[in-house]
Amino acid sequence: MLTPEEFNPQYFGDWKIKTERNNKYLNFIRGHDCIDCGWPHELGRIEAHHIYTGGMGIKCSDYDTVPLCGSGARGCHKNADKTPGKVARYQVFLPKFRKEWGELCQE
């Protein structure tokens, strides 16, 4: 067992958790309408919601985010144990946003 001095939440044995950060990508995601209710991004309150967790206190990669309105994002946290299918439904959107982002980066 690790002592508190030896414990580093970014490392587990030889495996390092890689959490990619990209503020430009998050802003790109916030520029889309909510995928849950269709709330238009022009009206604001769209969040880049991380759909996975990297563990306690560790966010997943910024490339694993979807656009949700404020109430949609709160609902995910509030009802996480009651809506296991939401993450699977949100995963469908990840390739779409990554492809759009890749095309924007090539311009």
Image: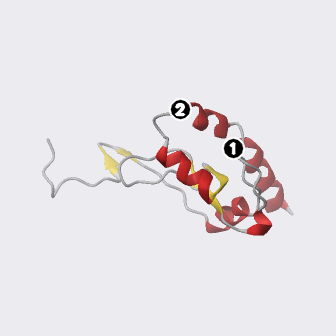
Measured as percent of width and height from the top left, residue 6 is found at 18, 54
Q: Residues within 10 Å of mark 1 (few under 14, many from 20)?
A: some
The kind of secondary structure element at disc 2 is loop
Q: Quadrant of residue 28?
A: bottom right
Quarter of the picture holding the C terminus: bottom right
Question: How far separated are the C-alphas under marks 1 and 2?
Answer: 17 Å
Measured as percent of width and height from the top left, residue 74 is found at 53, 53
Image side of residue 17 versus residue 25, left or right: left
In this orientation, which residue lies closer to the viewer: 32 or 63? Answer: 32
In this orientation, which residue lies closer to the viewer: 95 or 47? Answer: 47
In the picture, the disc for residue 84 is 2
Q: Residues within 10 Å of mark 2 (few under 14, many from 20)?
A: few
Q: Residue at x 44, y 47 (%)?
A: 54
What's under tag 1, amino acid-wise?
A: Leu
Quarter of the picture holding the N terminus: top left
In this orientation, which residue lies closer to the viewer: 66 or 60? Answer: 66
In this orientation, which residue lies closer to the viewer: 80 or 63? Answer: 80
Image side of residue 3 versus residue 102, left or right: left
The kind of secondary structure element at disc 1 is helix
What's under tag 2, amino acid-wise?
A: Pro
In the picture, the disc for residue 94 is 1
Measured as percent of width and height from the top left, residue 84 is found at 53, 32
Image side of residue 1 versus residue 103, left or right: left
Image side of residue 2 versus residue 72, left or right: left
